[in-house]
Amino acid sequence: MHQVILYTRVGCHLCDVAKDVAVPVCADTGAEFREVDVDADPEDRAEYGDRVPVVVIDGVEHGYFEVDADRLRRALTG
């Protein structure tokens, strides 16, 4: 099973949109989904800064700013 982490920030509209796309794709593919607030950890904030949302699949960065449902689904099922 794949693990998807979505790095977000409170009050980020793009983050809300990304989550709305990622959650159903993860549910459909059986991937584990977790959301992480970058501002809760100084290391995450330093790593991702203003480049949120960031999607990480199994520890590898998949993309940022937008989540393409078809691309995410291919990554999780391929």
Image: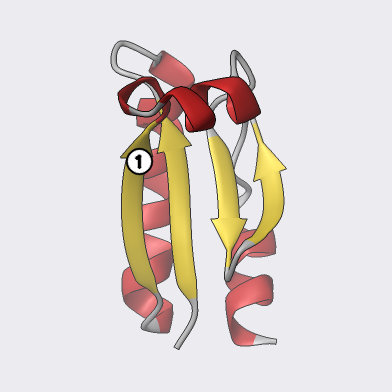
Does residue 4 appear left or right of residue 68 in this picture? Answer: left
Residue 55 in the image: x percent, y percent?
A: 57, 48
Name the one closer to the observer, 72 or 54: 54
Residue 48 in the image: x percent, y percent?
A: 61, 27
Residue 40 in the image: x percent, y percent?
A: 31, 26
Residue placed at 61% from the left, 64% from the top? Answer: 59
Residue 9 in the image: x percent, y percent?
A: 38, 21
Q: Which residue is disc 1 drawn over?
A: 36
Name the one closer to the observer, 25 or 33: 33
Residue placed at 58% from the left, 71% from the top? Answer: 58
Q: Can residue 69 be seen at all in this image of the molecule?
A: no
Q: Reply above or below: 56 against 75.
A: above
Colour approach in the figure: secondary structure
Q: At numbered mark 1, what does the secondary structure look like: helix, strand or loop? A: strand
| Quarter residue 17 falls in | top left
The amino acid marked with disc number 1 is Val
Residue placed at 40% from the left, 15% from the top? Answer: 13
Q: Can residue 51 be seen at all in this image of the molecule?
A: yes
Name the one closer to the observer, 19 or 70: 19
Residue placed at 59% from the left, 21% from the top? Answer: 46
- In the rendered image, the quadrant that contains the N terminus is bottom left
Q: Residue furthest front?
A: 42
Label 1 crowd (10 A; few <14 / some 14-19 / many >=20) = some
Q: Reply above or below: 33 against 44.
A: below
- In the rendered image, the quadrant that contains the C terminus is bottom right
